Amino acid sequence: MEGTGQGPIIAVVAERAVGETRVAATPETVKKLVKLGATLKVESGAGRHASISDADFVDAGASVGDLAATVKDADWVLGVQAPAVLDLAGAKPGAKVAAIFDPFRNRDVIDAYSAAGFETLSMEFMPRITRAQSMDVLSSQSNLAGYKAVLVAADTYGRAFPMMMTAAGTITAAKAFVMGVGVAGLQAIATARRLGAQVSATDVRSATKEQIKSLGAKPIFVESVEGIEGEGSGGYATEMSDEYKKAQAELVSSHIAKQDIVITTALIPGRPAPRLITDEQIASMRPGSVIFDLAVAQGGNVEGSVPDEVVEKHGVKIVGFSNTPAHLAADASALLARNFFNFLSAFWDGEKNEVVLDEEIGDAIRLTKDGKVVNERLTA
Ligand code: NAD
């Protein structure tokens, strides 16, 4: 498993985190990277859960071996979640490791990478600029997560989503409410609409109102207190004022009691997820209703939600996965792998036959280099 001595050696490791089913490369992206001049090494079994066999990777031009052989002399290591630092001992000194690091919650991992001298590149810190859209792992994964959340909610719900007129009588359409209309929320609205629910949605960013309407759903917004106008910082929400939170809680209380399905997706980068639904509000819902908390792994939007468990409170089922995209392993991997490929190929220097990052994107995603934590979002 030696490199050709031309382009970089790119290692793709199998995921070891519990419940992680995705893989950072697919035969399609392996083929494209080999064409660019890279040498691809894939750990045996890396694609197993995503329906990709070792033979598929070999056919695409990668060599397949155990962890040590895969990582040996690698210039780059790609992972979905950050691999353990110890597992990368055989890589080149200062090798680049690109993955989803969850840096705010895994500071100890970042420090360990720094101490080991690796250059870590956190894919979820990709700036939200037009040219980086195709490299944006948060978007590609959130989109699938929003879709899956609705399917799981529909499956958990003891009633149907669409209105049905049958000889035995009419079934009324389910009422679904989506809280947080970013990438996941928009897909949740579209999916719930496709299934025939009557959909309403809310966000703190007023720009989402038009997006909600354009998907045929009803916007439910706090009008008495100003939310976030424009796109905010890169389109992200911030923590809201106490006055806004109070107005939002009142609005949600009156609306939620009439809902059958609630999908919550609200996140604030670097902070715990905002609490949007209290136990009291859950109690006001009709028994048999379902809430899917997409933010459960970030602390949860819903009081009492527990990752990977169906919690029943006041007759309402509360569901949420610790890793929703992992429930769509093949498509989530396909999109992630393309995000990685688009990133590497955008910075491919054909003459040097290596990846040369620019400042705007490089500095935004680089966490550690030369034994130091260098990202200002972590050092500030
Ligand atoms: P996110 O995952 O950070 O948050 C999900 C949603 O929750 C957001 O819409 C946010 O406003 C909302 N939210 C936060 N606090 C809330 C609260 N208290 N109550 C209700 N809602 C709350 O967001 P995201 O999906 O990453 O998308 C954020 C924005 O960035 C979107 O406008 C998206 O279109 C944009 N975006 C741009 C690019 C790009 O240009 N490259 C890429 C991806 C997303």
Image (cartoon, rainbow, N blue to C red):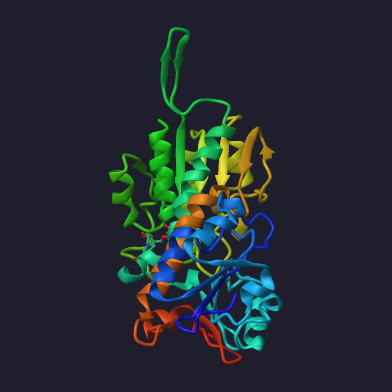
Of 171 and 286, nearer the camera is 171
Q: Position of residue 67 (x, y in %)?
A: 67, 70
Q: Position of residue 288 (x, y in %)?
A: 60, 30
User: Hey, which residue is sitting farthest right in the picture?
Assistant: 86
When the figure is inspected, residue 226 is found, relative to residue 219, above or below; the finding is below
Q: Is residue 39 left or right of residue 280?
A: left
Res 38 seen here? yes
- In terms of image quadrants, where is residue 286? top right
Indicate the position of residue 310 as horizontal and vertical percent values.
67, 41
Please determine whether, in this image, residue 70 is positioned above or below residue 291.
Answer: below
* Residue at image coords 64%, 67%: 65
Quarter of the image with the N terminus in it: bottom right
- Give the image location of residue 151, x and y in percent: 51, 38
Residue at 40% x, 15% y: name it: 165
Which residue is farthest top?
A: 167
Residue situated in front as seen by the camera: 322 or 293: 322
Where residue 136 sits, quadrant-wise, is bottom left
> Residue at horizontal 46%, vertical 37%?
176
Q: Considering only vertical position in the picture, is 113 above or below 163?
A: below
Q: Is residue 251 visible to the viewer in this orientation of the structure?
A: no
Tag count in the figure? Answer: 0
At a point 65% along the width and 74% down the height, the residue shown is 69
Left-right relation of 115 to 364: right
Q: Quadrant of ligand 1?
A: bottom left
